[in-house]
Image (spheres, rainbow, N blue to C red):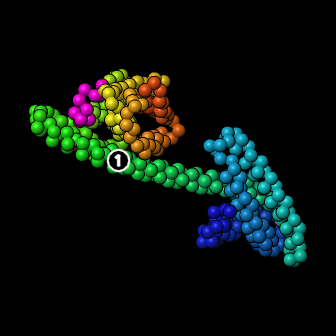
Amino acid sequence: MHPLLSAPRNFIVVFVFWLFICCCVAMLMVLLATNANIGQLYAHSFVLVLPWYLFFLFICFSNYYLCQLLQFNVYPLPVVIGSQLIALAVSVSLWLLLGFGWASQMDNLGLLEGNVFFQHTFNAHWLLGAILYCTWILIHYTYLHAVASEQKYAQELQQQLLIKSIDFTSVKASVHPHFMYNSLNTLANLSLVEPEKIHGLCVQMAEFLRYSVNYSSRPQVSLADEINHIQNYLAVESERFPEKIKLSIRVSEQANAAQVFPLLLFPLIENSIKHGINSSTDSGFITVDANVANGMLTVRIENSLDPSGTKADSTRVGLSTLRKRLHAHFGVNFQLNTETADRRFSVQVEIPFTIHLVTQSVESLA
């Protein structure tokens, strides 16, 4: 339905304004036919113009559906213009034919020179009809563009809210309660055997918690900040499993400067600890590789698996939440793949590579 027809108040306003235009046209036709020696000139003009031009309003309304179909972002400009010109020619021609028929019937109202008046003002009518029809084309496209812009803004706002919602969920899940319990137990044990390590470990825990809690104030961080964050986490975990974690991090200089959303790596590293190192009876490894190629940042995290070890329950919440965050930020322009083979488990993330000219260190989150 035409938007004006679905809103009675708007239709009344447009109808009254169009009626005013019809009256102006009728007066214009009187001026054009002054020298035609037509009797009852005002009566001929208003009787012909008012109903005829009011009907033309609904013909113009019908163009709305053609404008909906022929969007500029869907069809080439020549196709749109050509189709609208054909619609203009057909609509105005049918309207002029209707006007001729109505002028022929005016003698039934006692106006015997209707055809003469119509023929005398014919050129003005087709010109005005073309102008008015083109005006409605512009009105319809302007309205559709405004509606599309509003919908796009609403979608962008909804997308931002989705990102914030997912990120907030990620924040709550990032500081795992078990990590806090285990860290406090580690500090308690160190106070008895190696108290000199407590200060450094407390600093790393504080950095880890500060990054996890305060990151929401920034939409992006550098991959170097993410690497520093997981190193703080692994430093604490390493105290729980002395000599058990072999960590290898290989990140290219270009990848280090890449801008990513915060806590991209933490759920992957946490899974490596929970399902790899914790479940292993022997020492295990975690490797982190990151590089840039073909405009994409690729991060691969691999950890050892022990088939004979105790298996931790998997909820898959970490990977599921990460996939949702990647989709919210990048749409379909990302890859998240997992692979299990040869006592190894790996996760590979590919996202568009972006970089800021000026990057800020994680200390700015304080």
Say whether residue 5 is left or right of residue 244: right
Q: Which residue is mark 1?
A: 173
Q: Which image quarter holds the N terminus?
A: bottom right
Give the vertical position of 170 relative to 147 (above or below).
above
Residue at image point 52% right, 54% down: 150
Q: Which image quarter holds the C terminus?
A: top left
In the rendered image, which quarter is residue 135 located in? bottom right
Residue at image point 75% right, 51% down: 88
Q: Position of residue 5 (x, y in %)?
A: 66, 67
In this rendered view, identify the residue nearer to me: 172 or 167: 172
Residue at image point 66% right, 69% down: 15
Local secondary structure at mark 1:
helix
In this rendered view, identify the residue nearer to me: 261 or 314: 314
Q: Residues within 10 Å of mark 1 (few under 14, many from 20)?
A: some
In this rendered view, identify the residue nearer to me: 203 or 316: 316
Is residue 84 something that shows in the picture?
A: yes
Q: Amino acid at mark 1?
A: Ala
Q: Give the magenta range.
A: 236-246
Q: Position of residue 283 (x, y in %)?
A: 31, 26
Asked if residue 12 lies in the magenta stretch, the reply is: no
Q: Position of residue 215 (x, y in %)?
A: 30, 43
